[in-house]
Image (cartoon, helix red, strand yellow):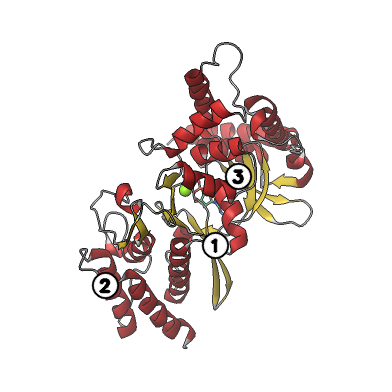
Amino acid sequence: MSHHRILTKLHLIAIFLSVITKYEPAEKKSSLQLLTQQCRYDTEVLCPGCFSASINCDFFENFLTLDGNELLEGIMHCINQHGVRYGTLNDNKQRVVIRNLNKDGAVRALSDEICDEIGTSGTEECRLKNEEPYLRALRRRVLDENLVEGAVICPSDEEVLRRLLLEIDGHELSKMLLLKVNVQPLLLKMLHERGFPVPKLVFQGGFTVVETYEGQSLVNFYDNSLNVRLMIANELIKASLKFTNGYNGFRFYLTDMSLDNIVVRILSSKEVKLSFVDLNNVIILDSHNRRLNPHAHTHSRIDCDGCFAYVQNDICSYEKSDINLYAVCQLLLEDLNGDSSRGFLHNLDDNPNLVTIQSLLQNCVYCSPPHCENRQAILQRIQTIIRDVVYNV
Ligand SMILES: Nc1ncnc2c1ncn2[C@@H]1O[C@H](COP(=O)(O)OP(=O)(O)OP(=O)(O)O)[C@@H](O)[C@H]1O
Ligand SMILES: [Mg+2]
């Protein structure tokens, strides 16, 4: 490239940066104002029936500071599709994540569909109400096994849904809408206080939620020392058992257990804390339901190019499935294309204990049901080896 062209490019970059710096103070405020405005729109226009009158949308402006350069953040936010931003609570300096639940106008699309169905569209702007015809239409969608969006509730019957909704406070309308649009805040409410490794919900303002920041994605720990990775593996195993055992009869099967969706904080040389931050792809099973097959379901590996495949109908028909346990074995052993050099526990060296872990994982992932060793037993043996190697106990 000629000197002239380089200078021209540098010149343009300098103009761009000076524009950003010039307008930054005003923009910094407006980003938080936008969150407040969005909250008002959600609660007063988009779905007043979903929220109690006392939601304090000023929370965003009064209690929150967004990270970094607001304008650059704003631009990055538009480019990345994640829908999360980072910030700090002003009073206790707690790091938080701000998440938009209503991606791609999902609430509006669902509301329009329901108004069309019950014949209230056309008269005025469609608004869902906490009334029976709307609730009935939503309930049917929440329980429809053929619709792909939203959490899967199974077995899919009204009694299961009723029991589940009783576990969470709030308006029925808003709870059911979130089951379809983004189940994350409902699960955080249910699970955090019961000791599950998930963030804490700090605030919900309309369809924007603020939750605690819980560390960096597992991807960032991929090249960490083996000791750190073994401690993380131990926590992953604990978590997979906890979500499977669930509480009050409900089990939670996570069908998108990827390195992106789990975050980690290193607390000390002997302690790490794990958190599952993307709970939107979940199957919630009511294991007390009498229609279920009382035997345990053993998941069988299904070849799938870069994806995690499973048969929903199987998982939803048995009182218990080992799919979470399988998913952890797979995450530790290989990537979703079956490449074992890309598993989280790659490069286990020649230590005989670690070779045993490798072969237990191989067995866990590649066995063919019904000839599989119990996966819980396999994972517990791995935990014993990890404790031996990492903690010398
Ligand atoms: N509570 C949290 N603490 C720390 N990091 C988080 C938290 N929530 C999200 N993140 C980070 O943001 C990234 C994106 O979040 P998430 O996985 O929930 O979004 P997404 O994959 O875009 O969502 P979805 O799959 O629902 O569209 C995560 O990979 C993680 O790095
Ligand atoms: Mg994700």
Question: In this figure, which residue is indicated by the disc labeled 1?
Answer: 197
Q: Position of residue 36 (x, y in %)?
A: 72, 34
Q: Position of residue 359 (x, y in %)?
A: 26, 75
User: Where is residue 176, by image quadrant?
Assistant: top right
Image position of 302 (left or right of 260) = left
Above/below status of 186 relative to 208: below
Q: Residue furthest front?
A: 290
Which mark lies nearer to you, 3 or 2?
2
Q: Position of residue 329 (x, y in %)?
A: 34, 66
Which mark lies nearer to you, 3 or 1?
1
Q: Is there a contact, CB below 8 Å, between mark 3 and mark 1?
A: no
**Which amino acid is tagged 3?**
Arg
Question: In this figure, which residue is indicated by the disc labeled 2?
Answer: 373
Q: Is there a contact, CB below 8 Å, between mark 3 and mark 2?
A: no
Question: In this figure, which residue is indicated by the disc labeled 3?
Answer: 85
User: Disc 3 and disc 2: Cα gap in Å?
Assistant: 43 Å
Q: Nearer the viewer, residue 156 or 344?
A: 156
User: Disc 1 and disc 2: Cα gap in Å?
Assistant: 27 Å
